[in-house]
Amino acid sequence: MRLSPDEVIFWQVGFFKLNATIVYTWGLMLVLAVGSKLITRRLSMGLERSRWQNLLEVVITAIEKQLEEVGLSQPRTYLGFLGTLFLFVALSALFTVFPGYEPPTGSLSTTAALALCVLVAVPLFGIEEQGFGGYLKSYMEPTVIMLPFNIVSEISRTLALAVRLFGNMMSGAMIMGILLSITPFIFPVVMTLLGLLTGMVQAYIFFILAAVYVAAATQVRKLEPKPQPQPKAEPNP
Amino acid sequence: MDSMTIIAVASIITAGLTIAIGVIGPSLGEGRAVATALTSLAQQPDASATITRTLFVGLAMIESTAIYCFVVSMILLFANPFWNQAIAQVAGK
């Protein structure tokens, strides 16, 4: 039994292997990039619009709303990175409806790469927002004693992001393989439906967690108490 | 029993124990989380969007510990490093 799509090798020249993970990742990237390029080529500003433009607008506004609810007050800044993460993970789970396809997120290499992107992007967003010193100082909140713990949490949450997505996607494929050998009639269809649901939930969770990390890195300084409006003086009797 | 058999027996038993014991904690935790979320949903249905989102994120965080156990048991069963080392030693003889 295969543990990940890394082991399906289409083509190999010496050390260089072209495995299913790379092929499907590039396929997804092509679908995402070419699709959105084609749709946004003829955008209409009026009431009359194509159904594909409508779909993209629904997706983008939903992502923006989620980002705002997490606490990123200017979601457009982070839409490019976080929205792409969500779209990639969600699409890679959604495409399991096609036979012969295996989600590239079922390979630890892909999820580790995505988690490393988050690990790099969070300090970059933090530095952009609060400056270099300000961001470094946020590691020493609330006291200096917390410095190693903050660094360890930074690393461990990256590991958790990668392994969580990998484990969920891999377990879906694994359950399918086991069920196909035991009850190959109806149950695999039901489990595929369940796999679609968990894939969407995992994509949402990956995206929301990344957004929460970005929000935590960019907002540390904004927690200064706002000037409270003066309480109205009691009307003198 | 030669060393290969010992490694195989230990791996299989440990994989079963890993998933069996490791799932107890997360399942209890998820049950408590869902029960509390349902209670608060019944008390304030207006906040259902926030409660559901937080519930899903929390469930995923809890579930990830069970997923770690699953990954470890899968590695023990299908990609066992000790097994490969033992095979390499036998082949090297």
Image: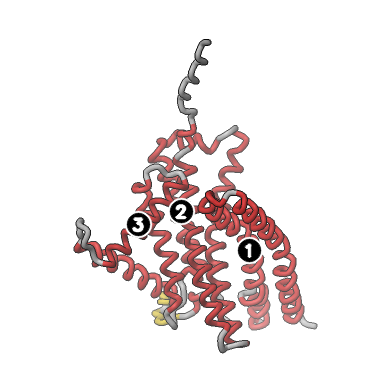
Residue beneath disc 2: A118
- Residue A231 at what x, y percent from top left? 50, 20
Separation of disc 1 and disc 2 at Cα?
A: 20 Å
* Residue A173 figure quarter: bottom right
Q: Earlier in the sequence, mark 3 or mark 2?
A: 3
A8 to B62, vertically: above or below:
below
- Residue A107 at what x, y percent from top left? 50, 70
Of the pair A108 and A40, the residue shown nearer to us: A40
Numbered mark located on residue A60 in the image: 3
**Is there one chain holding both mark 1 and mark 2?**
no
* Outermost right residue: B1
Q: Residues within 10 Å of mark 2 (few under 14, many from 20)?
A: many
Going 55% across and 74% down the picture, which residue do you hit? A172
Numbered mark located on residue B68 in the image: 1
* Outermost top residue: A237
Question: Which kind of residue does numbered mark 3 sit on?
Answer: Ile
